[in-house]
Image (cartoon, helix red, strand yellow):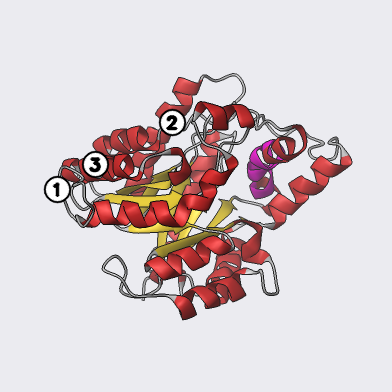
Amino acid sequence: MPLSHITLSLLDRANTRRGSTEAEAIARVLDRAQRAEELGYRRFWVAEHHGVPGIAGSAPAVLMAAAAARTRRIRIGSGGIMLPNHQPLVVAEQAATLQALHPGRIDLGVGRSLGFTGAVRDALRTGKEAADRFEADLAELLAHLSGTAPVTARPRDHAATPVFVLATGAGVDVAARAGLAVVLGGPALFRPGPEGATAVLERYRERFRPSSWWPQPHVVVSANVAVADTREAARRLLLPEARALAVSRTRGEFPPLEPAGPADPGALPDRERRLVEESLAASVHGTAPEVRAGLEQLVARTGADELLVTGGAYDLEAQADSDRRLAALFAPRPR
């Protein structure tokens, strides 16, 4: 399928950068939302992280409201709101309020991830078992959104809010049973075998139960993507976040992004260097023709309906240029 037939969207996690404030990180999210609208992206999503030094995006509903107020047409959503951290009624009320303010422009992506550390989980009043309630919490959220719960989520005079499940493994089955769209990303997209994207999404489609939210299966693939003049330049654009992710997995803290050094990642410890390379391998980066080919292969393998581009960069100018080049790949080709 040509890329021009695929919906293209952006997810911005509000990465912080060394030498810059967290308030500036939030402001850059709003600037990027405006540019995404100008470039023709379909959706602009924000995320939820708590107590993470390298990410300022902790309150997705608040950030969604700000992004929606700064734009006019692009859909604004969450990628996602983590249900274990919230009461379903509160999430429904936030979505309803946003829809009332910006009718027909709000998406609700939800996930089951817990706080990164024990201290964060304690602060959120959630234990490790909270993720086990995800399917029940999701059902309650849908009841509030549809007006069938014992308590009515208000305001009620709003358009229906599309609901997406951010899923890996069992989360895909939850989405299928609930009749919701699924967002699948990470290494699974590039992994062969029964745990790879092809098999997982085939299971999702087979088990999907049509609902009032989605009459048929709907797949969003989420991947880090970078486009530049050369493959090496695109790789270097992704390196700061790949390095921060490797540090988080080895030292327990996701740090602010730093510029890629000339020897990066060669100077890293062996395990961190391996994690960086794994992260880069689970991305699509290169020149425009290389990225086009890589994304066409990804779409063909997954049968994706949409692509949600993720990945934060230290070099803001190069990131904006990558966003522009990527949007051009999805524009209809002249006949």
**Split into 4 quadrants, where in the image is the C terminus?**
bottom left
Q: How far apart are marks 1 and 2 (CA)?
A: 32 Å
Q: Which element carries disc 1, helix, strand or loop?
A: loop
Crowding near the residue tagged with mark 2, few <14, some 14–19, many ≥20 C-alpha atoms within 10 Å: some
In the rendered structure, find residue 194 and report the number of the disc placed on it.
Answer: none
In the rendered structure, find residue 156 and report the number of the disc placed on it.
Answer: 1
Q: Which residue lies furthest to the front in this view?
A: 150
Kindly report which numbered mark, 3 or 1, lies closer to the viewer in this rendering: 1
Q: Give the residue type at disc 1.
A: Arg
Q: Distance between the residues labelled 3 and 1?
A: 11 Å
Majority secondary structure of the magenta segment?
helix
Q: Residue 46 is drawn in which quadrant?
A: top left
Residue 34, image x and y in percent? Answer: 34, 40
Start-end of magenta stretch: 234-244
Q: Give the residue type at disc 2.
A: Arg
Q: Residue furthest bottom?
A: 206
- 215 relative to 114 in the view: left or right: left
Q: Which residue was labeled with disc 3?
A: 98
Q: Which element carries disc 2, helix, strand or loop?
A: helix
Dot 3 or dot 2: first in sequence order is 2
CB atoms of marks 1 and 2 within 8 Å:
no
Tell me the residue at 67%/46% (across/down): 233
Q: Nearer the viewer, residue 229 or 194?
A: 194
Q: Which residue was labeled with disc 2?
A: 28
